[in-house]
Amino acid sequence: MIELTNIVKEYQGAGGAFRAVNDVTLTIQTGEVFGIIGYSGAGKSTLVRCINLLERPTSGTVRVDGRDVTALTGAELRRERQSIGIIFQHFNLFPSRTVAQNVAFPLAKLGLSREEIDARVTELLALVELSDKAAAYPEQLSGGQKQRVAIARALATRPSVLLCDEATSALDPTTTHSILSLLKQLNRDLGLTIVVITHQMNVVKEICDRVAVMERGRVIESGPVYDVFANPSHELTREFISSTSTLTRVNELVAEGSPVVALRPGEVLVRLNYQRRDVNEPIISSISRSFDIDVNIIFADVEVVADAPIGGTVAILSGTRDRVDAALAYLPQNENVRVEVIADAR
């Protein structure tokens, strides 16, 4: 659906040219939810605005559904943009217009009759579950309701692509979940291709099929969400994952000398991370039985990402030295789990 080829976007400043997007090539498949994640200033919002030419690339090509968007100007470009909806962090609603009037706005120049516009607005408000708010004004709505209005407006022209530029960053966790659930429903029911720009790892985990990680204008890592999160190859990706996982808390507890992770002689503190989808094997109970050791789980962080469990466990292994060593030697042979020794009370 979307092909970005060698996209470069430069801005001229007092210090010379600044390259916000630096030679990015990505392919986004029809009907998938694709995430682009990175810290502020990584270039992700600039990149997504290049897709509908709100920002025209300095060089490179953008193809949407096989058509070279970068070759279009004027009326042709305006028509093409009707197939690409976009929603933003701060909703961008017209405060002096009602909800219905906000949703109707993109339809004004399509040559539709008043009856056709009213019918489309009614359909869209029902889709985002705001039928009872048609006559309300944006100031009377919650943040989640405002974003639902923005989504309805973005869908007014029946686009095949929906761009979401930090669309949940201004929302609380519960409202974020409801908006992501709506986006998943739209992706499933309408076949929408959705591109999600975010710095929130939980957003990517909950909704995306594939993800690209950006840093300083470049894509440094990309792939299926589960593969990238289970086996990150770049330090920035590992940093993102660590920021949302309680498993990294163990390092702080060790540094603080917390009694939670205090070891008796011969004990070993380990962190086990799942790195494959098939985790049906009961690893903890298996090593406990096979090597006659005790495994004391301190805490765990396991969640479902792309319909498969991801995360891991922090535990203390106790037993005779030879049996604990044998268990530690066995664990790396299991391709489903990665083992890291955090502390060893030899």
Image (spheres, grey):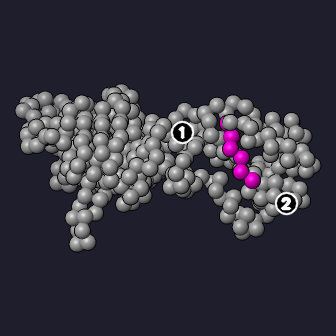
Q: Where is residue 199 in the image (x, y as percent from the top left)?
A: 43, 53
Q: Which of 206 and 235 is in front in this view?
A: 235
Q: Name the residue under label 1.
A: 227
Identify the residue at horizontal 17%, vertical 54% (top origin): 96
The image shows residue 314, relative to residue 334, as above or below, that is below
Q: In which quarter of the image is the C terminus?
A: bottom right
* Residue 273 inside the magenta-drawn segment: no
Look at the image and give the residue range highlighted in magenta.
336-341
Is residue 343 among what the camera can see? yes
Q: For this view, does 314 lie left or right of residue 72? A: right
Crowd class of label 1 (few under 14; some 14 to 19; many from 20; radius 10 Å): some
Q: Where is residue 242 in the image (x, y as percent from the top left)?
A: 57, 54
Crowd class of label 2 (few under 14; some 14 to 19; many from 20; radius 10 Å): few
Identify the residue at horizontal 52%, vertical 35% (top origin): 306
Amino acid type assigned to the residue bearing label 1 in the image: Asp
Q: Residue 345 carries which label?
A: 2
Q: For this view, does 326 lie left or right of residue 108? A: right
What predominant SS class does the magenta segment belong to?
strand
The image shows residue 251, relative to residue 174, as above or below, that is below
How far, Cα to Cα, is label 2 from label 1?
A: 34 Å
Q: For this view, does 177 lie left or right of residue 286? A: left
Is residue 165 among what the camera can see? no
* Residue 339 inside the magenta-drawn segment: yes
Identify the residue at horizontal 53%, vertical 55% (top origin): 235
Q: Quadrant of the N terminus?
A: top left
Whichever of callouts 2 and 1 sits on the residue coming sooner in the sequence is 1
User: SS class of the residue under badge 1?
Assistant: helix
